[in-house]
Image (tube, rainbow, N blue to C red):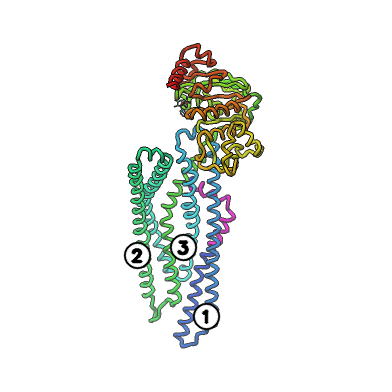
Amino acid sequence: MKLFNRTLSYYKYEWKFYTLGIFLSLLSAGTSIYAPMIGKQMIDYISEQVSNHQTIEFGWIMQKFGFFMLVILFSSLCGYASYLLLAYASNRVSKKLRDEAFNHMQKLPVSYFDDKPAGKISARIVNDVELLRTNFYMNFSNAVIIDILTVGSIYVALFIVTPKIGTALLLLFPFFAIWQWIYVKLATPINKKWRESVSDLNSHTAEIVQGVSIVQLYHQQDSMLEEFEETNQTWLNTRIKSIRLDGTLSWDFSALIKNLVMFGVLLFIGTQFVDGVLGFSIGTIYVIINYISRLFDPILELVRMMSTLQQALSGGRRVFELLDEPIEADSTEPLNFTEGHVVFDHVTFGYDPEKAVLKEINFSADKGETIGLVGHTGSGKSSIINLLFRFYDPQKGAVLIDGQPLVEKNRESIRSHMGIVLQEPYLFSGTIATNISMNDPKITDEMILDALEKVGGKDIIAKLPLGIHEPVVEKGQAFSSGERQLIAFARTLASDPKILILDEATSHIDTETEEIIQHAMEVVKEGRTTFIVAHRLSTIQNANQILVLDNGEIKEQGTHESLLALDRYYAEMYHLQAKGAAS
Ligand SMILES: Nc1ncnc2c1ncn2[C@@H]1O[C@H](COP(=O)(O)OP(=O)(O)OP(=O)(O)O)[C@@H](O)[C@H]1O
């Protein structure tokens, strides 16, 4: 119930449209129920005049007919306006919920994303909100209101016309309650399986799309298709089961009940003769048949609604789970950057506090210095960077920038003076210019061109018709990895950070590109405290300090020359790489 109320509570943002929609819906239901009463007057008048051998006044008939049409038109217009208003409110409410979920997701700590596939998180924001929109806000809350109002008005009208039949038809309610109970029991497992198969299809397709080149390279198309067809077949089977259930329990069964009720009511009417005269006028019989035939569709919709609601709420639960994820507490105090002096003071850290991946890390980096981080995979290089960005806080010790402990400072202010160039730079959809300026209005086109020129990336735009305004799509797949890196270097230079992180920026590229990147690196490093996470030791030979990490500990620390002279771990790695390069 809590979940239901919470989902419904979002209507408060659109209460005006919603209230007006309900009012118009009530008006539409009331007038559409009133229309057959006018029909009844016309039918009874004609049959009376005919049976009394009197003339029929066509003027009166036309007047009534005109009124009848007006009422129907008014009812339709109210129904149309109410549908629009309710649909408008529902869609706006869904947008609000989706905006909220997206905004919240962006504020979540990086650790939240560690063990969750991106597809699952985006499904909560896109698919589950869509499920809420269609199944709850559109189908459930709106349709239920219209259906309840319609059914209620029909019963009220039936009671006015003939209380006996109205009372007898109340017996249908316990029957419909049982019907609904059976429907939910049968539909729930089918719907659950169906939703799972859709989710499987989604993740399966996304996986193959991402790895399509590998699939083709290893000729895996047939086996992938086989797996896909299997999941798709499960989806089809659940759909067929669902259609059969709907067909049997909803439409066929409903038609049977409707006919039985109609038969019973007419049988009852047929017994109502008093002194050879039928106790119901033909007009009244018309009204009763009209009402009964209109009673079943909304009831049927209400019967099916429970299962729709269940599906909607399962989506709602997932959206609210995301919304309830706690945002990291953050300080309002900004970090006051002066020089970019970094200190790691006896830092111990683990993603799982019980399992330290960095142990007693101690070092200090002065303004403009370059620190090289080397070590085997998993030795803790990226974890040091994660602490520097304050994506995580250490369990012991402190990370300080310009003498201020990061744990006491606002995260955004820490990151605002840092730049990073990743091995696989991330380009956003937009243009080259927006990727360099990162939509900062203070960075002009001239500054963008200047940054590109300084890092040696002017050639990239020379061949593009729109220059720096050339669109970037699909994470910049149309650019080579070297070009993407130069754009990322230009971005970093334009943002003028105090601290710079170059994450394996020179691995996996050819010698010519390496030279270009090396030049870009030298330009961007100028005057900034720089951390280079390097696999190629050639990149950090000129570093002021090299930290050799092993299993989360600093094993060796010094300059290239001093570490070579030490002739231990670093020297061994260096000679191995030099040998590899020579062969
Ligand atoms: N988000 C995370 N959650 C849990 N454990 C993690 C996470 N990121 C890294 N680790 C673990 O922490 C340890 C250090 O990883 P880290 O990424 O810092 O190493 P690295 O030296 O940068 O490795 P590589 O050169 O392969 O990038 C590893 O054992 C790794 O499995």
Using the rendered image of the protein, determine whether residue 475 is visible from the camera's viewpoint: no
- In the rendered image, residue 5 lying in the magenta stretch gets the answer yes
Which residue is under mark 1?
61
Which one is closest to the eye, mark 3 or mark 1?
1
The three-letter code of the residue at mark 1 reads Ile
- In the rendered image, residue 236 lying in the magenta stretch gets the answer no
Image quarter for residue 485? top right
Q: What is the C-alpha distance between the residues marked 2 and 3?
A: 19 Å
Which of marks 1 and 3 precedes in the sequence? 1
Q: Which mark is residue 256?
A: 2
Give the answer, above or below, for where 506 lies relative to 579. below
Residue 42 x, y percent position in the rendering: 49, 78
**Between 209 and 480, which is closer to the camera in this rendering?**
480
The three-letter code of the residue at mark 3 reads Val
Asked if marks 1 and 2 touch (Cβ < 8 Å), the reply is: no
Magenta span of residues? 4-25
Residue 214 x, y percent position in the rendering: 39, 38
Circle 3 packing at 10 Å, graded few (<14), some (14-19), many (20+), is: many
Q: Secondary structure at mark 3?
A: helix
Horizontal arrangement in the rendering, residue 543 relative to residue 246 (left or right): right
Using the rendered image of the protein, determine whether residue 446 is visible from the camera's viewpoint: yes
Give the answer, above or below, for where 347 lies relative to 189. above
Q: Is mark 2 within 8 Å of ligand 1?
A: no
**Between 345 and 306, which is closer to the camera in this rendering?**
345
Q: Which mark is residue 151?
A: 3
